Amino acid sequence: MMEKKYWKDYQREIADDDYFYHRSCIRQTFFPGSEALFLKILKNELGKNVTDDPNLHTCTGIGYHSDVVPFDTTMTIVARLLSQMNKSELKNFVPSCVTTFGLLSEVLDTWKHFPEELEKTRKFLKEATGREFKIPENVAHPSDIIYKNRKVLKGKMKYQLVNKETGNPLKVVEHIGCHYAKIFPENTTGGAEFPQVLAGMIEAWEGKVIDYPERRHCCGFGFRQYLIMANRGYSVANTKKKFESMQPYEPDFVVANCPGCAMFMDRWQYTIAEMEGITYDKNKRGIPVLTHEEMTGLLLGYNPWDLGLQVHQVQVEPLLDKIGVVYNPDDKYVGKSGIKLSEPQRPKNI
Amino acid sequence: MDSWGFSIAKTRTIDIDSVDFKVLARLTDKVPSAKRCIMCGACAATCSAANFVDFSFRKTHLLFHRGQFSNISEELDKCMLCGKCKLVCLRGVNTRAIIYNLRIILNDMNYKRIAL
Amino acid sequence: MKKKNVIVIGGGPAGIEIAQILSNYSCNVTLFEKEPQVGGQIKRIDKLFPDFIVQDEMMQKLISNLEKTDIQIHTDTEIKDIEQIDNIWHLKTNKEEAFTADAVVLATGFKTFDPKYKEELGYGIYPGVITTLEFEDMLKAGKIQTSAGEEPRRIAFLNCVGSRDEKVGNHYCSRVCCINAVKQSIETKELLPNAEVFCFYMDLRMSGQFYEELYRKSQEKHGVNYIRGRISEASSTFDHRIQIKSEDTLAGLPLKMTVDLLVLMIGVEASEGTTNLSAKAGILGEYGFAKSLSLHLKDNLTKKEGLFLAGACKRPSTLREVIADARAAAFEVVNYLKMEING
């Protein structure tokens, strides 16, 4: 009784080379290694030309989605980001954060359908900073680029998504950020219902994608409902719903391409465990959550502690052992300077 | 952490999988005409009580059919048993009988009643 | 006087009926049908609404009337091209043969919407999601079962799949699905009395004679449950059943449940033959259907002389309407060609 795979045939345009990278506001705090790793993969493994401009800043996605920054301001600030591309002559914008990706899509779509808004933004930017900008030729998310190169990367991988002991493919839950697929399905490979970007990677790397009932459900992030503490229960309830749904499938790990989603799915397992005493895996240690860069980097053979996996809420060692990654457990909390940093306390329930 | 400042929101989705249809059968065995209700709302439209309190016989009857038994008893207390709903029902549903029987069925199930 | 030639394109109920009637008049009738056999889409149905007449028996009556005539029937032959030159119609088949006629009747009918385009419903992805026609196959076989060969305990019907839907470009109502869902719900309860049957609808359009009574009977006698609300997505559960999400709009609450089978009431679209030939003949109407000259009084005529329309090539129709329409079209053809009935 095989479920026939019918993925929508739509393939989106992903630029080949010459990327202008835009870092995320908060990602580097929660997932320290991911952005540096992406740049390393592009430069060292794939030999691509990618610029990491230090003069970049927020896209105001957080502010815009919290009703704090008006859309006009957002458009102007996005325009300033794009104006930074002028110097390097690059035409392909690659935002690390899925919110930025969604925001770029929204702003570019607005400018396409309402040219008067584009003119207004040009005027605002010129008046405020004296800068001019061009519309980028291509906006791709880093996960798109890794997806595009997944077969090439496979050739360089030391490990695959296979359980070393049993030889079975690892069961992976993939989670796509809402702003990546749901708002502009034409910007996703595979459309909005079954986006291929993470599933394609997982399958290329010998893993098995879990199709569970709440797969398309939002993790609950979204800024507005989460920023104020009293509302947070509403956000957490969504992640809880997803975990309850995926639990019977016993996934080995979760991978997300959005920084917010990865953070939620990782951190809320602790919250739910402490508040309600519930964990969603058999060993009661939680289901590890990785960003797509971390997943790629692990398989390529990078040191897990260089990837920043030690700061994850749900401890990743069980997953590393399943894959058969060679690592030194004693190095976990040793900093780059060689001095051992203090270890965090183990939570009560997870 | 002892105080989180929030509690995890509870779902409000009707989960048909957890509905006990035997309870519904207890009503429809006594009042078979309840099965042919099309939720048109003629009953609620003419209802005397609905003018003054938040009560809709249509909605209450529907929620019973969906297994949401929790505050139906309180709702039924609002009914004046005037019979106008039974007069106007297009499908000839015996709405008054539904109210009588629902009270019995729900009482039997010991639904906790809160004062109006 | 030389006998006129009439060509009927399409061997469904409309084509069969009009061809059979015209054979009684002083003309040569030729019937073209692209499938290996005549009968049309209705052949897939087990019992007809609203009276549960067995389709096969009814269609056999029509077909045997046809077989009694001396009409030339070309099956496995599709008309690909149509052109009018000096009041004569020139047709070309897929086998590159050419035919001419003084009058042509377009009876090329309809096709059904392919629900794979509604990805969120999981058709073609999850084996538990099937179309109303696939369900009809099960009814014909007298056995309703899941893809695992088990008896389903709970079945959901979703109305308006591919109809009244802006996303797929079909704004219209397909007319026959609501009553079909009621019919199939009853047939389900007759085959599986202990199964729970749920019908998800936006409106329940019981617009024909005896339809409303059938709806009432499905509720009272058979205990079919009706939920006003659409199913927004279907996903697979761990035990390979289908989880559906809906809203009970009358309760104002979201609703979900797990079913063994989800039957999609797919809508009616113009068949490829209808769209292709209507376009070539210059009578293309909305949504690819054929356009009649005037809705009320000239519904079997077109703006091209000698080109007539019969049946579901104009719009979604029931079988009764299609047969009546074919008879009306026959009247128009006889009038146009000023024919006499055979002695």
Image (spheres, coloured by chain):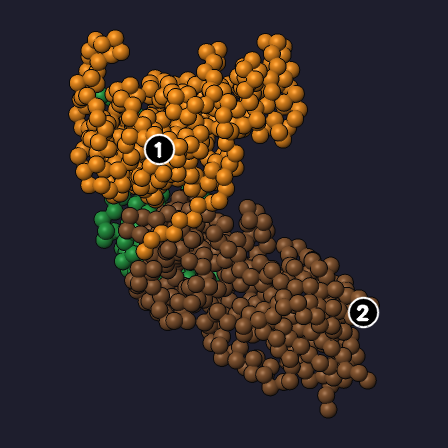
Q: Residue under mark 2: which chain is it in? A: C
Q: Position of residue C247 (x, y in %)?
A: 42, 46
Instruction: From the image, state the color of chain C.
Output: brown
Q: Amino acid at mark 2?
A: Asn
Q: Is residue C210 above or below residue C67?
A: above
Seen at 39% across and 67% down, the residue is C138
The numbered disc on residue C87 is 2
- Left or right position of C130 against A33: right
Q: Nearer the viewer, residue A110 or C189?
A: A110
Mark 1 and mark 2 in contact (Cβ < 8 Å)? Answer: no
Disc 2 and disc 1: Cα gap in Å? 69 Å
Residue at the disc numbered 1: A155
Residues indicated by labels 2 and 1 sit on the same polypeptide chain: no
Q: Secondary structure at mark 2?
A: loop
Instruction: From the image, state the color of chain A.
Output: orange
Q: Is residue A97 above or below residue C148?
A: above
Q: Which chain is green?
A: B
Tell me if residue C181 can be seen: yes
- Left or right position of B32 against A186: left
The residue positioned farthest toward the bottom in the image shown? C343
